[in-house]
Image (cartoon, helix red, strand yellow):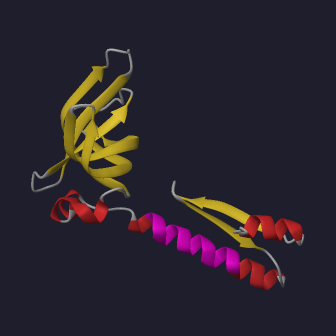
Amino acid sequence: MRVHCRELCQVVAVPILSFRVGTRHKLDIPMKGSPLLNALTVALSLLLSFLIAYAAETTVKAILENPSRYDGQEVTISGKASSVKPTTSRKGNDYMTFQVLDSSGAGVTVFTWGHPTITSGSVVQATGTFRQVKRVGRRTFYNQIDANRVSLVKP
């Protein structure tokens, strides 16, 4: 039987500091001891969360040079949008695909639900799960990011 920190701390009445780091990591920190130790624990936890979030930033070039390293990982990339295609599925669901190009012209395909207000030539930032190979029905897609967040950096 596995006992998680949250369950154990609730049984012994220890306060818990709980926060999320990105979309995949959750930190539950038992807050027990002196206020100084608690403050230090919080500061180090926030620093760790910043470093993890910063480490998720990557480049198109890095992904294309070693796609297996990033397969299934959440990544954030920035670059120039190209081949922007807003589409509506047969079921009526809006989605968009586009390329994010780096300065050398290498690109990664981005898929996102909805129709974000981006156009070809816009500088964008996309965050989502990178898939080296993605199969949808009979179709196969390569080197694609399933974005959960797309933002316009510069029109």
In this view, the residue in front, 86 or 154, is: 86
Q: Quadrant of the N terminus?
A: bottom right
Q: Residue visible at 24% across and 39% down? A: 122
> Does the image show residue 81?
no
Residue 10 percent across, percent down from the top left = 85, 65
Task: Classify 72 as above or below 89.
Answer: below
Task: Classify 115 as above or below 65.
Answer: above
Q: Residue visible at 76% across and 79% down? A: 38
Residue 78 percent across, percent down from the top left = 29, 52
Q: Residue visible at 74% across and 78% down? A: 39
Residue 100 percent across, percent down from the top left = 22, 46
State the image quarter where residue 135 is shown: top left
Q: Residue furthest left?
A: 104
Task: Classify 74 as above or below 55.
Answer: above
In this view, the residue in front, 22 or 78, is: 22
Residue 70 percent across, percent down from the top left = 30, 61
Q: Was residue 23 drawn as part of the magenta stretch in this picture?
A: no
Q: Quadrant of the C terminus?
A: top left
> Does the image show residue 140?
yes
Apparent side of residue 12 relative to residue 93 in the rendered image (left or right): right
Q: Which residues are magenta?
A: 41-53
Apparent side of residue 140 relative to residue 96 in the rendered image (left or right): left
State the image quarter where residue 16 is shown: bottom right
Q: Residue visible at 17% across and 54% down? A: 102
State the image quarter where residue 41 is shown: bottom right
